[in-house]
Amino acid sequence: MYKQELAIIVQSIIASNTVDEHIKHAKELSGFYGKISTVQHSKNNETLIKGGIALSSSGAADCVDDYLRTVFFIKGIYKALTKLSNDFPERSINILYAGCGPYATLILPLLSLFDEDRINAILLDINAKSIESVYHLLSVIGLDQYQLQLIETDATTYTKPENFTIDLAISETMHYALTSEPQVAITRNIVSQLPAHGILIPQEIRIDLAYTFFDYEPSLKNAKQEVKGHKQMQPYPHNVFVDRLFTINKELFGSVIHNSKIESNFYDLPAHFDNHPDICIFTELKIFDNIELKTAESYITNPYCVVSLYSIKDYSGIQFVYDFSEMPKWSYTLKD
Ligand SMILES: C[S@@+](CC[C@H](N)C(=O)[O-])C[C@H]1O[C@@H](n2cnc3c(N)ncnc32)[C@H](O)[C@@H]1O
Protein backbone atom coordinates (compact mmCIF):
# COMPACT_ATOMS: atom_id res chain seq x y z
CA MET A 1 0.00 0.00 0.00
CA TYR A 2 2.76 2.47 0.98
CA LYS A 3 4.77 1.49 -2.07
CA GLN A 4 1.92 2.44 -4.36
CA GLU A 5 1.26 5.70 -2.50
CA LEU A 6 4.92 6.66 -2.82
CA ALA A 7 4.97 5.75 -6.52
CA ILE A 8 2.00 8.05 -7.15
CA ILE A 9 3.69 10.93 -5.30
CA VAL A 10 6.97 10.54 -7.18
CA GLN A 11 5.20 10.29 -10.53
CA SER A 12 3.43 13.56 -9.71
CA ILE A 13 6.78 15.14 -8.83
CA ILE A 14 8.29 14.02 -12.12
CA ALA A 15 5.29 15.30 -14.09
CA SER A 16 4.98 18.61 -12.21
CA ASN A 17 5.58 21.73 -14.30
CA THR A 18 4.76 24.78 -12.21
CA VAL A 19 6.13 26.04 -8.91
CA ASP A 20 2.74 25.48 -7.29
CA GLU A 21 2.72 21.87 -8.47
CA HIS A 22 6.31 21.35 -7.31
CA ILE A 23 5.44 22.63 -3.84
CA LYS A 24 2.21 20.63 -3.63
CA HIS A 25 3.87 17.32 -4.47
CA ALA A 26 6.98 17.95 -2.35
CA LYS A 27 4.63 18.57 0.59
CA GLU A 28 2.96 15.23 -0.15
CA LEU A 29 6.36 13.54 -0.05
CA SER A 30 7.23 15.25 3.23
CA GLY A 31 3.87 14.24 4.70
CA PHE A 32 4.40 10.65 3.55
CA TYR A 33 7.77 10.42 5.33
CA GLY A 34 6.35 12.12 8.42
CA LYS A 35 3.54 9.56 8.53
CA ILE A 36 5.57 6.37 8.23
CA SER A 37 8.87 7.28 9.86
CA THR A 38 9.13 6.07 13.45
CA VAL A 39 12.88 6.30 14.10
CA GLN A 40 13.47 9.30 16.38
CA HIS A 41 15.61 11.93 14.64
CA SER A 42 18.00 13.79 16.89
CA LYS A 43 19.09 17.43 16.67
CA ASN A 44 22.26 16.62 18.63
CA ASN A 45 24.06 14.14 16.43
CA GLU A 46 25.95 16.42 14.05
CA THR A 47 29.39 15.06 13.13
CA LEU A 48 32.45 17.20 12.53
CA ILE A 49 34.84 15.74 9.99
CA LYS A 50 37.71 17.09 7.91
CA GLY A 51 35.82 18.83 5.10
CA GLY A 52 32.79 20.06 7.04
CA ILE A 53 29.89 19.29 9.34
CA ALA A 54 27.50 16.40 8.66
CA LEU A 55 24.01 17.54 9.66
CA SER A 56 22.15 15.91 12.53
CA SER A 57 19.61 13.27 11.49
CA SER A 58 16.87 15.77 12.31
CA GLY A 59 18.50 18.48 10.18
CA ALA A 60 18.93 16.02 7.32
CA ALA A 61 15.27 14.94 7.58
CA ASP A 62 14.20 18.59 7.29
CA CYS A 63 15.91 18.87 3.90
CA VAL A 64 12.86 17.26 2.26
CA ASP A 65 11.02 20.50 3.09
CA ASP A 66 13.40 22.54 0.94
CA TYR A 67 10.79 21.94 -1.72
CA LEU A 68 12.31 23.03 -5.03
CA ARG A 69 15.62 21.42 -4.06
CA THR A 70 13.88 18.12 -3.43
CA VAL A 71 11.75 18.24 -6.58
CA PHE A 72 14.55 19.26 -8.94
CA PHE A 73 16.96 16.66 -7.57
CA ILE A 74 14.35 13.92 -7.94
CA LYS A 75 13.55 15.05 -11.49
CA GLY A 76 17.25 15.19 -12.40
CA ILE A 77 18.06 11.80 -10.90
CA TYR A 78 15.06 10.23 -12.65
CA LYS A 79 16.32 11.64 -15.96
CA ALA A 80 19.87 10.40 -15.34
CA LEU A 81 18.63 6.93 -14.35
CA THR A 82 16.43 6.74 -17.43
CA LYS A 83 19.40 7.65 -19.62
CA LEU A 84 21.63 5.06 -17.96
CA SER A 85 18.92 2.38 -18.25
CA ASN A 86 18.73 3.08 -21.99
CA ASP A 87 22.52 3.15 -22.37
CA PHE A 88 22.93 -0.17 -20.49
CA PRO A 89 19.77 -2.18 -21.18
CA GLU A 90 21.38 -5.51 -20.28
CA ARG A 91 22.58 -4.84 -16.75
CA SER A 92 21.74 -3.16 -13.48
CA ILE A 93 22.70 0.47 -12.84
CA ASN A 94 25.20 1.02 -10.03
CA ILE A 95 24.39 4.02 -7.84
CA LEU A 96 26.52 5.51 -5.09
CA TYR A 97 24.49 7.87 -2.90
CA ALA A 98 26.76 9.71 -0.45
CA GLY A 99 24.92 11.29 2.46
CA CYS A 100 21.49 9.65 2.16
CA GLY A 101 20.08 11.09 5.39
CA PRO A 102 17.23 9.37 7.29
CA TYR A 103 14.83 9.37 4.30
CA ALA A 104 17.19 8.62 1.37
CA THR A 105 15.00 11.30 -0.24
CA LEU A 106 16.81 11.48 -3.54
CA ILE A 107 16.62 7.79 -4.47
CA LEU A 108 14.14 5.88 -2.33
CA PRO A 109 11.00 7.42 -3.93
CA LEU A 110 12.30 6.56 -7.40
CA LEU A 111 13.02 2.88 -6.75
CA SER A 112 9.56 1.55 -7.55
CA LEU A 113 9.72 3.15 -11.02
CA PHE A 114 12.51 0.72 -11.94
CA ASP A 115 12.59 -3.08 -11.81
CA GLU A 116 14.44 -4.58 -8.86
CA ASP A 117 17.09 -6.18 -11.05
CA ARG A 118 17.91 -2.83 -12.72
CA ILE A 119 19.08 -1.02 -9.57
CA ASN A 120 22.14 -1.80 -7.49
CA ALA A 121 22.83 0.94 -4.96
CA ILE A 122 25.22 1.74 -2.13
CA LEU A 123 23.89 4.32 0.33
CA LEU A 124 26.32 6.00 2.70
CA ASP A 125 25.80 8.16 5.73
CA ILE A 126 28.05 9.02 8.62
CA ASN A 127 25.05 9.21 10.93
CA ALA A 128 24.00 5.88 12.49
CA LYS A 129 20.44 7.10 13.16
CA SER A 130 20.00 7.98 9.49
CA ILE A 131 21.11 4.52 8.38
CA GLU A 132 18.79 2.90 10.91
CA SER A 133 15.93 5.04 9.62
CA VAL A 134 16.50 4.09 5.96
CA TYR A 135 16.52 0.37 6.88
CA HIS A 136 13.24 0.87 8.66
CA LEU A 137 11.63 2.78 5.76
CA LEU A 138 12.68 0.21 3.16
CA SER A 139 11.00 -2.52 5.12
CA VAL A 140 7.83 -0.54 5.99
CA ILE A 141 7.35 0.66 2.40
CA GLY A 142 8.13 -2.79 0.99
CA LEU A 143 11.24 -1.86 -0.98
CA ASP A 144 13.63 -4.24 0.77
CA GLN A 145 13.86 -6.59 -2.20
CA TYR A 146 15.98 -3.98 -4.07
CA GLN A 147 19.76 -4.52 -4.09
CA LEU A 148 20.77 -1.83 -1.64
CA GLN A 149 23.71 -1.73 0.74
CA LEU A 150 23.51 0.76 3.57
CA ILE A 151 26.86 1.71 5.06
CA GLU A 152 27.63 3.95 8.03
CA THR A 153 30.86 5.62 6.96
CA ASP A 154 32.60 8.88 6.09
CA ALA A 155 32.03 9.56 2.39
CA THR A 156 35.11 11.79 2.17
CA THR A 157 37.33 8.72 2.60
CA TYR A 158 35.09 5.80 1.54
CA THR A 159 36.43 3.42 -1.11
CA LYS A 160 33.91 1.57 -3.26
CA PRO A 161 34.17 -2.23 -3.74
CA GLU A 162 36.41 -3.20 -6.66
CA ASN A 163 33.62 -4.93 -8.56
CA PHE A 164 31.25 -1.94 -8.28
CA THR A 165 31.62 0.44 -11.24
CA ILE A 166 29.77 3.64 -10.36
CA ASP A 167 27.31 4.64 -13.09
CA LEU A 168 25.62 7.36 -11.05
CA ALA A 169 27.03 9.21 -8.04
CA ILE A 170 24.73 11.45 -6.00
CA SER A 171 25.57 13.77 -3.15
CA GLU A 172 23.68 16.72 -1.72
CA THR A 173 25.73 17.58 1.34
CA MET A 174 25.94 21.29 0.76
CA HIS A 175 25.17 24.67 2.25
CA TYR A 176 25.06 27.94 0.28
CA ALA A 177 28.38 29.09 -1.20
CA LEU A 178 29.73 25.63 -0.32
CA THR A 179 30.32 26.70 3.29
CA SER A 180 29.96 24.44 6.37
CA GLU A 181 29.03 21.08 4.83
CA PRO A 182 31.47 18.67 3.12
CA GLN A 183 30.07 18.62 -0.44
CA VAL A 184 33.42 19.41 -2.06
CA ALA A 185 35.49 16.96 0.00
CA ILE A 186 32.93 14.22 -0.71
CA THR A 187 32.76 15.08 -4.41
CA ARG A 188 36.53 14.97 -4.72
CA ASN A 189 36.61 11.48 -3.21
CA ILE A 190 33.74 10.17 -5.34
CA VAL A 191 35.00 11.68 -8.59
CA SER A 192 38.34 9.91 -8.09
CA GLN A 193 36.38 6.62 -8.27
CA LEU A 194 34.04 7.55 -11.13
CA PRO A 195 34.64 6.02 -14.58
CA ALA A 196 34.47 8.13 -17.76
CA HIS A 197 30.82 7.31 -18.42
CA GLY A 198 29.75 7.86 -14.79
CA ILE A 199 27.27 10.65 -14.09
CA LEU A 200 27.84 12.98 -11.13
CA ILE A 201 24.81 14.65 -9.53
CA PRO A 202 24.79 17.59 -9.20
CA GLN A 203 26.54 17.75 -12.56
CA GLU A 204 27.72 21.30 -11.90
CA ILE A 205 27.87 23.62 -8.90
CA ARG A 206 28.60 27.10 -10.27
CA ILE A 207 30.16 29.62 -7.93
CA ASP A 208 29.96 33.25 -9.07
CA LEU A 209 31.35 36.49 -7.67
CA ALA A 210 29.31 39.72 -7.73
CA TYR A 211 29.28 43.20 -6.19
CA THR A 212 25.75 43.85 -4.98
CA PHE A 213 23.50 44.99 -2.13
CA PHE A 214 23.22 41.81 -0.11
CA ASP A 215 20.08 42.83 1.81
CA TYR A 216 18.20 43.52 -1.43
CA GLU A 217 19.06 40.23 -3.10
CA PRO A 218 16.37 37.51 -3.04
CA SER A 219 17.10 34.94 -0.36
CA LEU A 220 14.99 32.04 0.88
CA LYS A 221 14.37 32.43 4.61
CA ASN A 222 11.49 30.04 5.18
CA ALA A 223 11.14 27.24 2.66
CA LYS A 224 7.84 26.03 4.10
CA GLN A 225 6.15 29.42 3.70
CA GLU A 226 7.73 31.56 1.05
CA VAL A 227 9.41 29.47 -1.63
CA LYS A 228 9.42 31.06 -5.08
CA GLY A 229 10.67 30.00 -8.48
CA HIS A 230 13.42 32.20 -9.92
CA LYS A 231 11.06 33.68 -12.50
CA GLN A 232 8.90 35.02 -9.65
CA MET A 233 11.81 36.81 -7.96
CA GLN A 234 13.17 40.30 -8.58
CA PRO A 235 16.97 40.14 -8.59
CA TYR A 236 18.62 43.33 -7.29
CA PRO A 237 18.93 45.52 -10.43
CA HIS A 238 22.39 46.98 -9.71
CA ASN A 239 24.08 43.63 -9.15
CA VAL A 240 27.46 43.66 -10.93
CA PHE A 241 28.58 40.20 -12.04
CA VAL A 242 32.36 39.97 -11.69
CA ASP A 243 33.35 36.42 -12.62
CA ARG A 244 32.62 32.74 -12.32
CA LEU A 245 35.12 31.70 -9.64
CA PHE A 246 34.85 27.96 -10.32
CA THR A 247 32.52 25.12 -11.17
CA ILE A 248 32.49 21.91 -9.17
CA ASN A 249 32.10 19.10 -11.70
CA LYS A 250 33.74 15.85 -12.75
CA GLU A 251 36.48 17.59 -14.69
CA LEU A 252 37.62 20.05 -12.01
CA PHE A 253 39.29 17.56 -9.72
CA GLY A 254 41.30 15.95 -12.49
CA SER A 255 43.00 19.19 -13.45
CA VAL A 256 42.79 22.33 -11.33
CA ILE A 257 42.52 21.21 -7.70
CA HIS A 258 45.46 19.34 -6.29
CA ASN A 259 45.02 20.33 -2.65
CA SER A 260 42.03 21.56 -0.63
CA LYS A 261 42.15 25.19 -1.71
CA ILE A 262 40.81 27.03 -4.73
CA GLU A 263 42.30 30.48 -5.31
CA SER A 264 40.80 33.08 -7.64
CA ASN A 265 42.51 35.73 -9.73
CA PHE A 266 42.87 39.25 -8.33
CA TYR A 267 39.90 41.48 -9.20
CA ASP A 268 39.84 45.26 -9.32
CA LEU A 269 37.91 46.81 -6.47
CA PRO A 270 35.33 49.32 -7.76
CA ALA A 271 36.05 53.01 -7.02
CA HIS A 272 32.33 53.77 -6.51
CA PHE A 273 30.03 51.26 -4.92
CA ASP A 274 27.04 53.02 -3.32
CA ASN A 275 24.71 50.81 -5.34
CA HIS A 276 26.62 47.61 -4.73
CA PRO A 277 28.55 47.75 -1.46
CA ASP A 278 28.80 44.03 -0.74
CA ILE A 279 31.05 41.36 -2.20
CA CYS A 280 28.94 38.24 -2.54
CA ILE A 281 29.09 34.64 -3.70
CA PHE A 282 26.21 33.20 -5.71
CA THR A 283 25.58 29.48 -6.10
CA GLU A 284 23.60 27.78 -8.85
CA LEU A 285 23.28 24.09 -9.66
CA LYS A 286 22.93 22.15 -12.84
CA ILE A 287 21.47 19.02 -11.30
CA PHE A 288 21.32 17.06 -14.54
CA ASP A 289 20.91 18.13 -18.15
CA ASN A 290 18.37 20.98 -18.30
CA ILE A 291 17.29 20.69 -14.64
CA GLU A 292 18.74 23.57 -12.66
CA LEU A 293 18.34 25.14 -9.24
CA LYS A 294 18.77 28.91 -9.39
CA THR A 295 19.61 31.59 -6.83
CA ALA A 296 17.31 31.66 -3.78
CA GLU A 297 15.04 28.88 -5.02
CA SER A 298 16.49 26.82 -2.20
CA TYR A 299 18.46 27.28 1.00
CA ILE A 300 21.47 25.78 -0.74
CA THR A 301 21.44 28.44 -3.48
CA ASN A 302 21.05 31.48 -1.23
CA PRO A 303 23.58 34.29 -1.74
CA TYR A 304 26.45 34.70 0.73
CA CYS A 305 28.20 37.95 1.67
CA VAL A 306 31.99 37.65 2.04
CA VAL A 307 32.76 41.26 3.00
CA SER A 308 31.46 44.81 2.67
CA LEU A 309 33.41 47.14 0.39
CA TYR A 310 33.05 49.84 3.07
CA SER A 311 35.36 47.85 5.34
CA ILE A 312 38.15 47.73 2.74
CA LYS A 313 40.31 50.87 2.62
CA ASP A 314 43.17 51.84 0.31
CA TYR A 315 43.44 48.62 -1.64
CA SER A 316 43.08 48.13 -5.38
CA GLY A 317 42.63 44.39 -5.82
CA ILE A 318 41.06 41.40 -4.11
CA GLN A 319 41.56 37.67 -4.38
CA PHE A 320 39.25 34.97 -2.97
CA VAL A 321 40.29 31.67 -1.45
CA TYR A 322 37.92 28.77 -0.90
CA ASP A 323 39.43 26.32 1.58
CA PHE A 324 37.74 22.97 2.28
CA SER A 325 40.59 21.29 4.20
CA GLU A 326 38.67 21.59 7.49
CA MET A 327 35.43 23.57 7.85
CA PRO A 328 34.81 24.86 4.30
CA LYS A 329 35.10 28.64 4.22
CA TRP A 330 35.91 31.72 2.18
CA SER A 331 38.67 34.23 2.85
CA TYR A 332 40.26 37.03 0.81
CA THR A 333 43.62 38.64 0.21
CA LEU A 334 44.02 42.33 -0.62
CA LYS A 335 46.54 43.98 -2.96
CA ASP A 336 47.80 47.60 -2.53
C1 LIG B 1 21.96 17.89 3.55
S1 LIG B 1 21.62 16.27 4.19
C2 LIG B 1 20.76 15.60 2.80
C3 LIG B 1 19.99 14.34 3.09
C4 LIG B 1 19.33 13.71 1.88
N1 LIG B 1 20.33 13.22 0.94
C5 LIG B 1 18.43 14.68 1.16
O1 LIG B 1 18.79 15.09 0.07
O2 LIG B 1 17.38 15.04 1.67
C6 LIG B 1 23.24 15.57 4.08
C7 LIG B 1 23.41 14.19 4.63
O3 LIG B 1 24.74 13.80 4.35
C8 LIG B 1 25.32 13.20 5.48
N2 LIG B 1 26.77 13.45 5.43
C9 LIG B 1 27.38 14.65 5.51
N3 LIG B 1 28.71 14.48 5.45
C10 LIG B 1 28.93 13.16 5.34
C11 LIG B 1 30.10 12.38 5.21
N4 LIG B 1 31.32 12.92 5.21
N5 LIG B 1 29.96 11.04 5.07
C12 LIG B 1 28.74 10.47 5.06
N6 LIG B 1 27.60 11.17 5.18
C13 LIG B 1 27.69 12.50 5.31
C14 LIG B 1 24.65 13.86 6.66
O4 LIG B 1 24.75 13.00 7.81
C15 LIG B 1 23.23 14.05 6.13
O5 LIG B 1 22.47 12.92 6.42
Image (cartoon, helix red, strand yellow):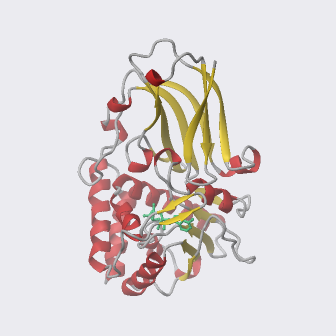
Q: Quadrant of the C terminus?
A: top right
Name the spot of residue 151 as percent of width and height, x first: 57, 79
The answer to whether any part of residue 290 appears in the image is: no
Name the spot of residue 218 as percent of width and height, x first: 34, 36
Which residue is outermost to the left? 225
Name the spot of residue 261 as percent of width and height, x first: 67, 45
Q: In which quarter of the image is the N terminus?
A: bottom left
Residue located at (75% from left, 49% from top):
258
Residue located at (32% from left, 54% from top):
22
Total labels drawn: 0
Image quarter of residue 274: top left
User: Left or right: where does residue 211 sit relative to residue 16?
Assistant: right
Image quarter of residue 277: top left
User: Left or right: where does residue 152 sit relative to residue 14?
Assistant: right
Which residue is outermost to the top? 271
Name the spot of residue 166 as percent of width and height, x first: 67, 68
User: Left or right: where does residue 252 sit relative to residue 271?
Assistant: right
Q: Can you say whether 104 is above or below 135 in the image? A: above
Residue located at (72% from left, 64% from top):
193
